Image (cartoon, rainbow, N blue to C red):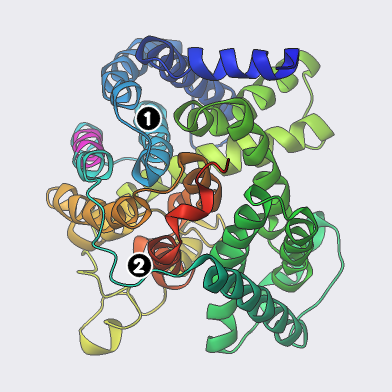
């Protein structure tokens, strides 16, 4: 065995022990809070105050007890997504202490913390595999991957007739609001870019089909001039990063490091350079520490303020239900938030939408618990697959789930398709070969 391989093996083994994982998740909690202190200097409605810092620290320490579940639980899809949700709720409870928005903060914090615990229970504990009535042979699975590539190429070709602009990321907002796609094309874009191509990349990569894996990354990058989103631009780099992390670390440590390392890099670089957000280090901090990590927490803060004195939606924001029931909001919630706060179209996670916005603070933990059972279906569908495969193939979904309702993630972004793909994937395909 070569020296680098031995080092990687030792590192994987050490960071997969409960004590080491506990230290890693507690370090992550501390870095998250420090990052939010720095984020507060760029957010006009969050004012860090040393007088209230002890309250925020006490709340963070209390919630960190929940994080120890990630040192004990086995890896699963729910583990991966659940850790990102933990980070989001930790961020919200920290922001809740310093926010300028006026709402019952203690009640909001208790509701969010209870919602997180209830969400994690099914997501971490339910692992029983489905009875596999339909399973593809390795040859049939190869044909499925070819079909995914064909559908992806066709989707890109069709979508590019509606929009295709090669412009800098700095100017995407000048054009993005004018983009319009037919309903079928819009769904295909979401399914292909969020689910089908990441799944195909992982399969080709782990099976040693490097040329096809590179082709998939190129196809993913082509969605940037079509959709003009940062998500599309950075997805290929994110998948490569997960491939590297999951090669060095076991799945649980890799899931934690996938959010800890980028956040820590942004914090250290900005602290060392003292740069503004307009500089290159500042833009990295803005993209990772603010937009990727702090913004989903801030969204829950804003939703709490908005729905303090306004009626809940009772799920009328879901497009298939809206025509069937009275809805106090004629526009999508993201547009309503834009019109109210002028912060851009503010989508939010299931905690803010299926939870708070739909049923209010008191009932939100129950609907979030129901969402946990829905997401736990991914554990059952992926049972028996290698942890690294599950981690990489679901790599973009935690970011999606932090920023959109569960109904949108399941349907528009094709999370249900990933569950089906996991279900039919031949388990023998990734078994060690003599």
- Residue 198 seen anywhere in this rendered image of the structure: yes
Q: Which residues are magenta?
A: 108-117
Q: Residue 148: percent from the left, percent from the top?
A: 61, 74
Check disc 1: other Cα within 10 Å, few if <14, some if 14-19, many if 20+: many
- Name the quadrant of the C terminus: top right
Q: Is residue 140 above or below residue 242?
A: below
Q: Report the front residue among 47 and 176.
A: 176
Which label was assigned to residue 90? 1
Q: Residue 80: percent from the left, percent from the top?
A: 42, 40
Q: Which residue is mark 2?
A: 407
Q: Is residue 45 above or below residue 272?
A: below
- Name the quadrant of the N terminus: top right
Residue located 80% across and 77% down the image: 164
Q: Report the front residue among 355 and 54.
A: 355
Q: CA distance from mark 2 to mark 1?
A: 23 Å
Circles 2 and 1: CB distance less than 8 Å?
no
Q: Is residue 28 above or below residue 20?
A: below
């Amino acid at each position: 065995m070569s020296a680098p391989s031995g080092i990687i093996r030792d590192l994987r083994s050490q960071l997969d022990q409960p004590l080491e994982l506990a230290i890693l998740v507690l370090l992550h909690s501390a870095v998250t809070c420090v990052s939010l202190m720095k984020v507060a200097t760029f957010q006009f409605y969050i004012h860090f105050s040393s007088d209230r810092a002890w309250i925020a620290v006490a709340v963070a320490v209390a919630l960190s007890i929940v994080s120890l579940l990630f040192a004990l639980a086995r890896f699963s899809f729910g583990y991966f997504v659940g850790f990102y949700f933990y980070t989001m709720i930790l961020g919200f409870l920290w922001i809740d202490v310093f926010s300028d928005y006026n709402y019952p903060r203690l009640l909001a914090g208790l509701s969010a913390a209870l919602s997180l615990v209830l969400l994690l229970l099914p997501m971490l504990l339910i692992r029983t595999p489905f009875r596999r009535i339909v399973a593809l042979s390795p040859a049939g699975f190869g044909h499925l991957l070819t079909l995914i590539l064909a559908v992806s190429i066709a989707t890109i070709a069709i979508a590019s007739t509606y929009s295709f602009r090669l412009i800098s990321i700095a100017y995407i907002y000048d054009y993005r609001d004018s983009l319009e796609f037919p309903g079928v094309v819009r769904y295909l874009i979401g399914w292909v870019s969020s689910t089908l191509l990441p799944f195909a990349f992982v399969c080709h990569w782990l099976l040693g089909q490097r040329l096809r894996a590179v082709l998939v990354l190129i196809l993913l990058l082509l969605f940037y001039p079509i959709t003009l989103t940062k998500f599309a631009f950075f997805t290929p780099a994110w998948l490569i990063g997960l491939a590297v992390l999951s090669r060095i670390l076991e799945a649980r440590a890799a899931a934690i490091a996938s959010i800890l390392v980028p956040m820590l890099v942004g914090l250290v670089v900005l602290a060392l350079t003292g740069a503004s957000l307009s500089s290159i280090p500042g833009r990295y901090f803005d993209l990772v520490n603010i937009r990727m990590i702090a913004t989903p927490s801030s969204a829950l803060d804003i939703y709490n303020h908005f729905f303090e004195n306004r009626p809940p939606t009772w799920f009328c924001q879901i497009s298939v239900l809206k025509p069937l029931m009275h809805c106090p909001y004629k526009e999508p919630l993201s547009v309503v938030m834009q019109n109210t706060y002028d912060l851009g179209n503010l989508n939010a996670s299931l905690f803010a939408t299926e939870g708070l916005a739909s049923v209010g603070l008191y009932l939100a933990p129950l609907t979030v618990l129901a969402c946990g059972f829905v997401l736990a279906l991914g554990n059952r569908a992926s049972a028996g697959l290698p942890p690294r495969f599950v981690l990489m193939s679901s790599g973009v979904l935690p970011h999606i789930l932090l920023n959109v309702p569960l109904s949108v993630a399941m349907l528009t972004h094709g999370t249900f398709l990933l569950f089906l793909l996991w279900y039919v994937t031949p388990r023998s395909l990734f078994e060690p070969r003599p």
